Amino acid sequence: DADVTQTPRNRITKTGKRIMLECSQTKGHDRMYWYRQDPGLGLRLIYYSFDVKDINKGEISDGYSVSRQAQAKFSLSLESAIPNQTALYFCATRGAGNYGYTFGSGTRLTVV
Amino acid sequence: GESVGLHLPTLSVQEGDNSIINCAYSNSASDYFIWYKQESGKGPQFIIDIRSNMDKRQGQRVTVLLNKTVKHLSLQIAATQPGDSAVYFCAENMGGATNKLIFGTGTLLAVQP
């Protein structure tokens, strides 16, 4: 099993719909992150969480919300999806005292 | 397939040649740097890292060089193979209270047989 699992892998949704992307990890890491990737723009941070009671906005949090249901689970929601939220979404984890991230395989989201 | 490589700088090399991928970082206070490899349809994977108190670190077929004076990082891949074809990102750890990684936009490495 992968250390960081994202579901779904692919999703097509309609404008205005609410959608949730889920992430779970088996690494026991406290820190979890959601990134968005667009062609030519690299990875941009949406939200991050250092533990279950800690939620922080990243550089592009507008239009998104998150929930840290447990140490191992961090979900990203689009309350009312719009076409410019079409992108690849990655969840990542990081252990305390470590600098490197472990990434999931990504969710390709298309908003039509 | 994955479209993350569109609009990226591209480095095209022949199989067996050495590759050098460059990255400029932004924060002189960054204390740690990582190179990631992203293959089509996959998430970024850790390749090699370096702390700011070092200027060179070697791994298996890869070397990272850090020049803090000009805020420049490079990744050297020896004897490049077709399996090395991917997008390569550098990342800098900003340190401080946020302690987050900031990623570069990436370079597409295309290995020609």
Image: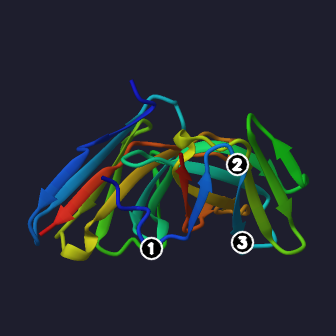
Write the residue at 79% across / 59% down. B31
Instruction: Rate crowding at label 1 as few (under 14), some (14 to 19) or many (20 or more) other CA atoms within 10 Å.
Output: some
Q: Are marks 3 and 2 on the same chain?
A: yes
* Mark linked to residue B17: 2
Mark 3 falls on what kind of element?
strand
The image shows residue B54 at horizontal and vertical percentages of 90, 52
* Mark linked to residue A10: none
Mark 3 and mark 2 in contact? Answer it, CB < 8 Å.
Answer: no
* Mark linked to residue B24: 3
Mark 1 and mark 3 in contact? Answer it, CB < 8 Å.
Answer: no
Q: Chain of mark 2?
A: B
Instruction: Rate crowding at label 3 as few (under 14), some (14 to 19) or many (20 or more) other CA atoms within 10 Å.
Output: some
* Mark linked to residue B7: 1
Q: Are marks 2 and 1 on the same chain?
A: yes
Write the residue at 23% across / 44% down. A8
Looking at the image, residue B44 lies above or below residue B100: above
